[in-house]
Image: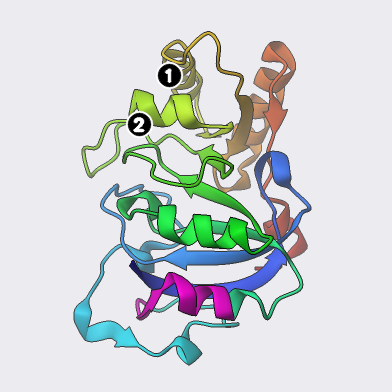
Amino acid sequence: MNYPVNEIFETIQGEGAKTGVPSVFLRLQGCPVGCSWCDTKHTWEVDKTKLTSIENVVDVSNTSDCWADLDENMLLSRLQKYSAKHIVITGGEPCMYDLRPLTALLHQNGFTTQIETSGTFEIYTHENTYVTVSPKVGMKGGYSVLVSALNRANEIKHPVATEQHIRDLQALLAKISHNQFVEVCLQPISQKKRATELAIAECIKHNWRLSVQMHKYLMID
């Protein structure tokens, strides 16, 4: 299985329940969801004229729309060069692709894996992959959040700025199987003061967790 890779870099996970975990981020190219506040809009299109080599997507702060076409064995070889053994597969929208060949190979070789997805595509991954669904409701692309994605989630990391976002989240949570435990994290959009105050109040009210995008406060990738 080949994957369009926009960038690979080692850092600290800055969001959600795994904040602080040393991680290698594997960012895939391609996303049709169309979030207005997206900070990686350069990953939306998979333009075949922007195909590049692996050297141009590794250990760089990549804000270009170039991508390398890499299979799971090439990715394993590259990822084994890092100290961190937790691999975060993000995008773009990584669940546009079948992630089972890649995640299975990574788990066989001593890695843990995490996917960060909008929940708008079916999730095909290893059974032990930690799945973070950051549900995107009413976005420009017109995609709906899938109940199957919510039920596969280990964590729902919900971007919030207004009370409507809280109502959207509660509607999604009502769809989850009663037997499914999922960690709920609220993430203020763009660290705005009002959004942060709302998120804190709702976390206290519902016993949810706050996700503050620590990497942006620390000014690291």
Is 116 situated left or right of 17 in this image?
left
The residue wearing badge 1 is 172
The magenta segment is 65-77
User: How did the renderer colour the structure?
Assistant: rainbow
> Pointer 2 and pointer 1: residues touching (CB < 8 Å)?
yes
Residue appearing at x 64%, y 64% in the figure = 109
Quadrant for the N terminus, please: bottom left
Q: CA distance from mark 2 to mark 1?
A: 10 Å
Residue appearing at x 45%, y 10% in the figure = 174
Residue appearing at x 46%, y 24% in the figure = 151
The image quadrant of residue 80 is bottom right
Give the amino acid at mark 1. Answer: Leu
Asked if the magenta segment contains residue 71, the reply would be yes
Quadrant for the C terminus, please: bottom right
Is 214 situated left or right of 92 in this image?
right
Is 142 situated left or right of 137 in this image?
left
Where residue 78 appears, as percent x and y from the top left, is 57, 80
